[in-house]
Structures are given as C-alpha cells and as structure tokens.
Image (spheres, rainbow, N blue to C red):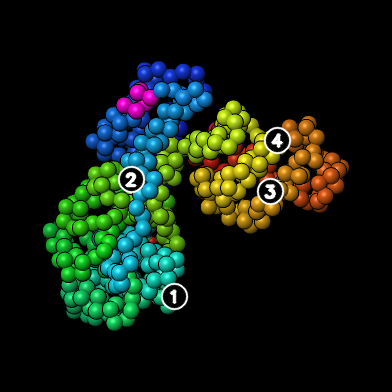
Amino acid sequence: MFDALTDRLGGIFDGLTGRGALSEKDVSAALREIRVALLEADVALPVVKDFISKVKERAVGEEVIRSVKPGQQVIKIVHDGLVEMLGGEDAETRLRVDNPPSVIMMAGLQGSGKTTTTAKIAKRLSERDKKKVLLASLDVRRPAAMEQLAVLADQLGANVTSLPIVQGQMPAEIARRALQAAKLGGHDVVFLDTAGRTSIDEQMMAEAAEIAKIAEPKETLLVADALTGQDAVETARRFHERLPLTGLVLTRMDGDGRGGAALSMRAVTGLPIKFLGTGEKLDGLDAFDAKRVAGRILGQGDIVSLVERAGDQLDQEKAERMAKRMRKGEFDLNDLAEQLKQMQKMGGLGGIMGMLPGAKKAKQAMAAANVDDNVIKRQEAIISSMTRKEREKPALLNASRRKRVAAGAGVEVSDVNKVLKMHRQMADMMKKMSKGGMKGMMNALGG
Ligand code: GDP
C-alpha cells in the first residue's frame, strides 16, 4: 500500500535526517519534493497545495525542540499533517447500527468490490458485534450479482442471510421487501447492495437516490477501487452530490496502486474512510486508521513513533542512539536485550508490533513461535548470561559457549538457539529496512 509514495518520501527524509540544523530553505526544498511525490501518488492538486501550505506554515513557524533533530521534526509535522488530512486520529470508523433494523446502503461502480465489501462488513458485524444481518441485492439487471450475494451470505454462518430472490421486482420494491423481512425476522442490520454501472449515469443515480429516500439508511457507504486513483476521486465527488453518503470504503489497498486516492477522496468529500479492503477473501477488511496509514506513507514514520514512545520512557539520548543504529542496520544482542526491555515497558509485544507495518504477519509468526511476555523475560535472562563480547559478536557463540549460557540462565540449549535465531531475523530485518526503506521492511516481514 502506498509503496510509490513511501519510497519517494523515504528518499527525501534520508536527506533531512542526520543533520544538525534545518534552515527554511531545507524545509522548502523538502516540501517541493513532497509536493511532487504526492502529485505522482495521484493526490489531487488542490489537496496537495492545501497540504503543503499547511505543513510549511507549521514547519517554519515552529521552534526546533532541542532534543529532536530538525529533520525528524519536519517528518513529524508532515506525519501529523497527513493524519489530519486523513481524518484525524479519532476518525469515526464505527458504523451506526444501533437501531434495529439499521439500513446500510452500499453504492459504487460495478467491479469496485461493492458486493465483496458488503459481505466483508456483514461478516464483521455478525462475528464481532453479534449482529443478525440480512443482505439484499438490488441489482435487478445482473442476476449474477444477486446470486453472488446469496452465495457469499451462505459462507457467513447462521447470523447472515440473504433476502430470497424474487424475479421481476424493481429495486425499490426489493428495498421495501428487505425492510419488511428484517422487521419480521428480527435482523439488526440490513444491507442494500445497489446496482453498479461501469460508469456513472443519471439513471443509476436517480435509482440510488430513490432507494435512499425509501430506506432511510443509517449509513450509505461508497465503495471505490483505490487502484483507479483520480477516477475514484471523481466518482466519490459525483456520488456525494446525489446521495447522502456517510462514509467511504477503499478496496484493493492490498495492491501496489497509487494510494493517493485515499488522501484525495477524504479531502475532496470530507467523508470519513471507514474501511480498507485488503484482499479478495472475506477477512480482507481493515478498519481505517489514519495514523497507521500516514505512518505507512512516510515509511519511517513507524520508527519515528517508536523513538518517540521510547523517549517518553527512557532518556532521549538512548532512544536516539537506538534509532540511529536501527537506521544503519546495526543490531547486536545488546540491542535485542534493550528492545526486549523496551517491549515490556511499552506495553509488551502488542504495543511495539502494533507500530510496525506488516505487523500482523510478524505477530502471527511470533505467536506461532510462542513469544509472549514471559518468554521475553526468559530471553532477557539468556542474553544476560552472555559475556559482553558475545553480545556484541553473536557469531562467537559456538556449541560449548551456548551450553554455558544455557546453564547460566537455567534453560535448554535449544532456548538459546531460539534467541539467536530471533536475533538473526531481527538483525536481517533492520538491515533490509535501513537499505530499502519501507519496501525492504515489508519484504523482511514477508508482506
Ligand atoms: P462489485 O461489482 O462492485 O460488486 O465487485 P465485486 O465485489 O464482485 O468484486 C470484483 C472483484 O474484486 C472480485 O474479484 C473481488 O474478489 C475483488 N475484490 C474486491 N475487494 C477487493 C480487495 O480489497 N482486494 C482485492 N485484491 N480484490 C478485491
């Protein structure tokens, strides 16, 4: 996601970090690059202009905090600006589904992923929120679409059903029938999956507007394909003119398209992005998180926040030293021990992993390797049973040394091996991350 933009910004910030002072000229130069990067990432021009001028105002006006490098400060300002542009930290992603039967109307162009997304959200509501859900397709022109929704409903367990298909009914009639069925059936949520066209036409809009009037949806979500970039923005703008949209869902965020669409759509419509579609499978849906997306756009944003959070807990210098080593791709067993200590201070593994992109996979891997907070304590014990030289140069740890370390920590040699393996993997990840920016990181994480 956002790979192109990420690479680009990564390059810019490489130039900015590691310098003592940052002049206004530097800020301007960086912002010029950011402007081009955003435009290339398909962010709409007015949105870019607005963003750049806001960031500049903030960056130039701001005093440089002594403990933070100016380059990092600009990164943070750009990061915060992106978060804001994406709807802020507390962007409203919850769906209003508290008044049964609550209607959720789904709109979008054909092929945008509307039907799949309908099923994904239904799955989420039924599994997480224990809602009873009814799915109704209003696509009378495409019988296949109606069947597709019924097939998806069948995969979603007993709490999700689809409205029986009655041939020859008009969309408005189906919508009324769905509402009636939901009232009688005690459904909490009714999805109305409206017909899509390959392009927007007046008839389609009129039909959707009529359904919105009849069904009074609590949520009207526009599903748009992130890969279509500027077209998606234009689609959003036109739908927003005619329908009481309450939110956006961007699909195919798993592809390597130009993610600027997310930034533009939010800015142009002012609508919250509620979910991101991240795959063809029905669990490929993420609640939108502005901070995370901004962090990914910036690439090293995650390192920055890691440093920031670490800085809250231990002294700033230590954190900066650590970040510097990480950026250089240096990572020995002392660093691993320090990381393990930090992990516990910063809310355990969950806290740290949550800040890393691709964290889901890494988390799964760690869960599979049975790494929990108790295990962390044991790992710390193992590392502290090593000599300083061994910690700096793990290659020294041959079989007999490993045996000694195991005995010292009261564990098996295989436990020592596990720590060494974990260190190798992390060192490898740091190296890739420092070389290839975010892409390297994602590769390192197998994402
Ligand atoms: P609709 O015509 O708008 O209802 O689109 P569909 O729901 O039928 O989706 C069209 C195609 O896009 C299908 O092959 C889906 O599996 C695929 N699709 C939907 N959402 C995503 C997504 O988030 N990521 C990926 N990679 N594919 C998706």
CB under 8 Å between discs 2 and 3: no
Q: Quadrant of residue 43?
A: top left
Closest to the observer: 184 or 367?
184
Q: Callout 3 environment at 10 Å: few (<14), some (14 to 19), or many (20+)? A: some
Circle 2: residue type: Gly
Looking at the picture, does residue 138 appear above or below residue 249?
Answer: below
Separation of marks 4 and 3 at Cα, in angstroms: 14 Å
Separation of marks 4 and 2 at Cα, in angstroms: 40 Å
Q: Position of residue 215 (x, y in %)?
A: 21, 69
Chain part drawn in magenta: 57-62
Looking at the picture, does residue 170 appear above or below residue 22?
Answer: below
Circle 1: residue type: Gly
Looking at the picture, does residue 27 appear above or below residue 434?
Answer: above
* Residue placed under numbered mark 3 in the picture: 376
Indicate the secondary structure of the residue bearing disc 4: helix
Camera-side mark, 4 or 1: 4
Q: Indicate which disc, 4 or 3, sits on the residue closer to the N terminus.
A: 4
* Residue placed under numbered mark 1 in the picture: 157
Q: Position of residue 69 (x, y in %)?
A: 49, 24
Q: Callout 4 environment at 10 Å: few (<14), some (14 to 19), or many (20+)? A: some
* Residue placed under numbered mark 2 in the picture: 87
Q: Callout 2 environment at 10 Å: few (<14), some (14 to 19), or many (20+)? A: many
Q: Position of residue 221 (x, y in %)?
A: 28, 59
Residue at x 66% of width, y 41% of height: 341
